[in-house]
């Protein structure tokens, strides 16, 4: 009989909460526990490393093994420095778009996607709250060109087959005045990372 896996505590971006819970339940990964930090930290990525460090320090009181479910997420390597100091691993890639697509494929598509604005299921669901309102576009629509004038299209990286989210993502593209493309990715490298814990 194989030994039971060791418990692992995951500290994750709130934008990944639904997907990680789905993976834990679907694969019966009862040895994994999850704590999520607010997804709005992505609007201030310089705050992510300190928030993750504080979560690691707090988690160490009860958990021996910790994994961080963040990519670099715009921290410019600062998150990796914190994780190296704390001896904790994280998800692969520069951001969630890369690990949903697959880090290697995302890198290969880099030039083609240079002028794309990406949405995930989470961002399609929270577009108003995490994009429009924080950028002030609800109050100052004249800023739209300044923020999105260099983009050509919205690319929705779909983790699910949810028709409502597809409509929401398409509406986001329309709101930004950009072309729309949907790519079914599923959970990509996130699934591999979580199920391997």
Image (tube, helix red, strand yellow):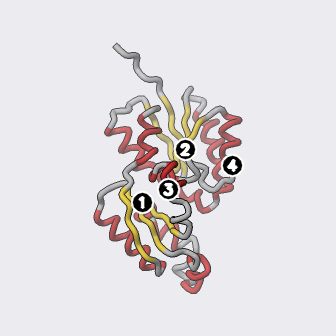
Compare marks 4 and 3 and give the one earlier in the sequence: 4
Q: Residue furthest bottom?
A: 142
Say which of 193 and 126 sits in front: 193
58 relative to 17 in the view: left or right: right
Question: Residue at coordinates 54% horizontally, 79% vertically from top-left?
Answer: 137
Which residue position holds label 3? 97
Q: Which residue is mark 2?
A: 92
Q: Position of residue 156 (x, y in %)?
A: 42, 64
Pointer 1 local density, CA inside 10 Å: few below 14, some 14–19, many at least 20 = many
Q: Position of residue 98 (x, y in %)?
A: 51, 53
Q: Mark 3 and mark 1 in contact (Cβ < 8 Å)?
A: yes
Label 4 SS: loop
- Calculate the distance from the C-alpha at mark 2 to the C-alpha at mark 1: 17 Å
Where, by quadrant of the figure, is residue 115 drawn? bottom right
Q: Which residue is mark 4?
A: 77
Residue 107 sits above or below residue 43 on the image = above
- What SS does tag 1 mark? strand
Q: Residue at x 46, y 63 (%)?
A: 119
N-terminal label among 2 and 4: 4
Q: Where does residue 91 sit, x and y in percent of width and height?
A: 54, 43
Residue 50 seen in the figure: no
- Residue drawn at x 70%, y 42% is 81
User: How many marks can you see?
Assistant: 4
First along the sequence among labels 3 and 2: 2
Res 62 seen here: yes
Q: Earlier in the sequence, mark 2 or mark 1?
A: 2
Could you give the CA–CA distance between mark 1 and mark 3, rounded to whole angstroms? Answer: 7 Å
Q: Element at badge 2? A: loop
- Point out which mark residue 157 bears: 1
Label 3 sits on a secondary structure element that is: helix
Q: Is residue 190 left or right of residue 147?
A: left
> Looking at the rendering, in which quadrant would you find the N terminus?
top left
């Amino acid at each position: 009989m194989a030994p039971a896996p060791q418990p692992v505590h995951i500290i994750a971006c709130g934008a990944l909460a639904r997907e990680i819970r789905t993976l834990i339940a679907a694969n019966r990964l009862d040895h994994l526990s999850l704590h999520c930090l607010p997804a709005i930290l992505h609007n201030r990525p310089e705050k992510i490393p300190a928030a993750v460090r504080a979560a690691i320090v707090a988690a160490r009181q009860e958990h021996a093994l910790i994994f961080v479910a963040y990519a670099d997420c715009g921290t410019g390597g600062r998150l990796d420095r914190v994780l190296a100091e704390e001896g904790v691993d994280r998800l692969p890639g520069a951001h969630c778009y890369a690990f949903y697509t697959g880090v290697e494929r995302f890198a290969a598509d880099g030039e083609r996607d240079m002028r794309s604005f990406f949405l995930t299921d989470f961002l399609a669901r929270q577009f108003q709250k995490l994009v429009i309102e924080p950028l002030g576009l609800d109050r100052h629509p004249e800023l739209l060109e300044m923020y999105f004038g260099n983009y050509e299209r919205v690319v929705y990286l779909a983790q699910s087959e949810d028709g409502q989210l597809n409509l929401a993502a398409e509406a986001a593209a329309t709101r930004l005045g950009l072309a729309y493309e949907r790519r079914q990715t599923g959970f990509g490298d996130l699934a591999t990372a979580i199920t391997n814990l």
